Image (cartoon, grey):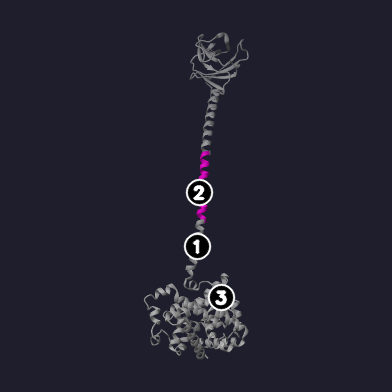
Amino acid sequence: MNIKEYIESGIIEAYVLGLASESEKAEFEQLCTQYPELVAARKDFEEGLEKHASEQATQPPVGVKVKVLEAIADTTTKGVEPVSINPPKIVTMPQEKRGSSGLLRFIAAASVVLLIFLTFFAYKSYKQNQDLESSNAALKEKLNSTQKTLDAIVDETNVVKNPNATVVNMVGTKVAPKSSANVYWDSTNNNVFLVVKNMPQLPSDKQYQLWALIDGKPTDLGVFDSKSDKVILKMKDTRKAQAFAITIEKQGGSPSPTLDSMQSLGKTLQSQ
Amino acid sequence: MGIPTTYNTEQELVLALKRRDNQAFGALYDNYAGALYSIIKQIITDNPELASDVLQEVFINIYRKIDTYDQTKGRLFTWMLNIARNASIDTLRSKSYQNSQKNQELPDNVYKGTANQSIQLNVDNIGLKKVLEKLRPEHRVLVELAYFKGFTHEEIAEMMSIPLGTVKTRIRNALLQLREYLQ
């Protein structure tokens, strides 16, 4: 290659001014590594261009330097590596806009995360609420039945503790010496309660029947079984009674007692 | 002018810049902003405010890209001049700028026609354009389009309805004349 001819071809000027094509640039740079005179000619033109440009310099507006230094200080403090970013955007966007768009993006992302959390917690608390409601209902039911049982026990206790009640201790007869029961008879309201202490098991077609003996005549006060889940049995009321008696009768009771099957007998104060 | 006074050689200045020495950068601005602003204003001829925005952008880019500057390929000023020219032409071609120019004449109408008419190009008598004045009109138009408007040789050939080879030759000749004027 005739380097002198190449130097005089105008390629130096085209290269320096940025008017050379990519292949021309590559060739020029390659030749620069081989021909110092080409480099020297390039430097000549560059210096002439720089000198001329400096002579023709136009004073830029005062504010530009401050803005540039501010932008650079921003870059330095943020530690951002110098990367090629689309420059027009960097300059024309005011700082606040950049900040607010970042803030907006952050808020948007945070909102999505928050929404997911809220949905999750709403579902969780809904489920928890349902569970609580059903367990609450179960507890209420349990409480009701317990209250009922307690009421019954209190009632029964009241009978035993009732100062107006007459306790008639019924003892076994010759037929059933071990049978025993107590009758609690409240003369103020005529209520009769029976506490079974020990009554032998009966065949399924038989029941015990309680009688009140009023002026020698037996009056039915109701039937009961030998085994009951209740401690105290509420029997029929009676205003008067000289004695109470228990007989074994057919299921459901009899209109008049079968006296030879009398199990126990107790006399009241009225009999004396 | 040339190298800032506090730095003995251009290499010293470049090393300080690559260290992200803000003081060196301030000195760089003081020494070259005027020359680059002049070039920018020769490309963005009708909007001084936009031109100063581009200058600001150019210096920020110089700061960001200083690591890519290779001293073996040319002087620092040449590198900065090309950044300034490219940024100006990009701005000239941006959509927002084009929209602001909507009501102005189309480039076709401006550049077609006789050599005499093309003398009326909006050439301000400043900077390199002053040098262009000394060129033959048919050469000047081509340099104007290639350098200050950023058109490729192919685009110029099509625009001016002249063969691509002629465009290349004329531009090369114009550039050679330019060198003589600059020396």
Q: Position of residue B46 (x, y in %)?
A: 41, 80
Which residue is rendered at x = 45% and y = 78% of the image? B155
For disc 1, the marked residue is: A105
Q: Mark 3 = which residue?
A: B65
The image position of residue A233, as x and y in percent, is 54, 21
- The foreground one among A159 and A178 is A178
Q: CA separation, marks 1 and 3?
A: 28 Å
Please tell me whether mark 2 sits on a helix, a strand or a loop.
Answer: helix
Give me the C-alpha separation between circle 2 and circle 3. 52 Å
Question: How many labels, in total?
Answer: 3
Say which of marks 2 and 3 sits in front.
3
Eye-nearest disc, 1 or 2: 1
Q: Name the residue located 51 percent from the left edge and 58 percent from the top edge.
A: A110
Q: Are marks 1 and 2 in contact (CB under 8 Å)?
A: no
Under mark 1, the amino acid is Arg
Q: Which secondary structure, mark 1?
A: helix
Check if mark 1 and mark 2 are on a common chain: yes
> What is the secondary structure assignment of the residue under circle 3?
helix
* Other residues around mark 3 within 10 Å, as few (<14) / some (14–19) / many (≥20): some
Tag 2: residue type? Ala
Q: Residues under labels 1 and 2: Cα distance? A: 25 Å
Q: Which residues are magenta?
A: A113-134
Callout 2: residue from which chain? A
Q: Which residue is mark 2?
A: A122
